[in-house]
């Protein structure tokens, strides 16, 4: 599982790399905040079965935002965004959209899975695998299975793009501290353990620490100038 902390850390790195002279506390908050919004579909899931990892994790979300920004800044005669916030506001908007795709949706796609084209196409996908250079097999990748297979969808094991089901089929797959799974340790079905993950692996911890260092360094540089 990828926690909101990890999503925010990756968003911070994207902001530090792409905002350039627009980087600052406010623009950083916009980019990180936009990524955090993606995880808020967990609350939608309290009312709509399967909405978590679907409602805001769909690629249609950043595409819609990109269309709005493109129309607002390139098609309209007068751009409110450009007039109100200048070139920095436009750059921040685009960086936020990039962060939504790569820091908000991307990590979940490569771990637990997301509903990529919801609601136009109701199907969760999960990409998992590896890329290796072998002295006998050459370059080997298992993220996308290009070989013929008779295995049913969702049972491809270590091979790549796997359809894992619709919102109705996997609606109870993604448990969080907000919407926890009932405990199986007791007879009382109301007993639940609410777990709010922070980091789930050494790689995630390294990402969070790296982001804290990089973003913190950029903020100190901005304060000194």
Image (tube, rainbow, N blue to C red):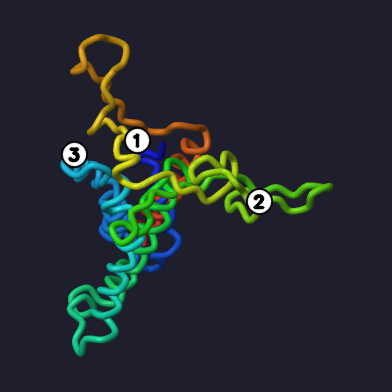
| Vertical placement of residue 108 versus 68, above or below | above
What is the total number of numbered labels drawn onto the structure image?
3
Q: Is residue 137 left or right of residue 103?
A: right
**What residue does disc 3 label?**
46
Labelled pair 3, 2 in contact (Cβ < 8 Å): no
Distance from disc 1 to disc 2, alpha carbons, whole Å, reads 27 Å
Residue that extends furthest to the top in the rendered view of this protein: 187
**How far is mark 3 from mark 2, CA to CA?**
37 Å
Q: Nearer the viewer, residue 64 or 20?
A: 64
Residue 197 coordinates in the image, percent (x, y): 35, 31
Nearer to us in this view, 97 or 174: 174
Name which of mark 3 and mark 1 comes first in the sequence.
3
Q: Is residue 29 left or right of residue 209?
A: left
Query: Taking 50 as reference, is 90 above or below it?
Result: below
Q: Which mark is residue 141?
A: 2
Q: Which residue is mark 1?
A: 173
């Amino acid at each position: 599982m990828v926690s909101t902390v990890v999503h925010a850390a990756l968003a911070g790195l994207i902001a530090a790399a792409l905002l350039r002279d627009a980087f600052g506390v406010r623009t950083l908050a916009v980019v990180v905040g936009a990524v955090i919004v993606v995880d808020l579909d967990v609350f939608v899931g309290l009312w709509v079965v399967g909405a978590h990892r679907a409602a805001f994790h769909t690629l249609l979300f950043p595409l819609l935002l990109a269309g709005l920004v493109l129309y607002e800044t390139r098609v309209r005669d007068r751009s409110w965004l450009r007039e109100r916030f200048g070139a920095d506001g436009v750059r921040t908007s685009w960086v936020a959209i990039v962060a939504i795709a790569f820091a908000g949706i991307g990590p979940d796609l490569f771990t637990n899975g997301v509903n990529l084209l919801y609601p136009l196409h109701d199907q969760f996908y999960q990409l998992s695998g590896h890329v290796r250079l072998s002295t006998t097999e050459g370059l080997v990748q298992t993220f996308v299975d290009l070989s013929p297979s008779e295995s049913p969808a969702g049972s491809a094991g270590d091979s790549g793009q796997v359809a894992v089901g619709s919102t109705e089929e996997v609606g109870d797959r993604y448990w969080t501290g907000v919407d926890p799974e009932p405990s199986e340790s007791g007879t009382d079905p109301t007993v639940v353990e609410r777990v709010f993950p922070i980091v789930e692996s050494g790689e995630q911890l390294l990402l969070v620490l790296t982001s804290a260092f990089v973003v913190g360094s950029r903020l100190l540089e901005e304060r000194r100038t």
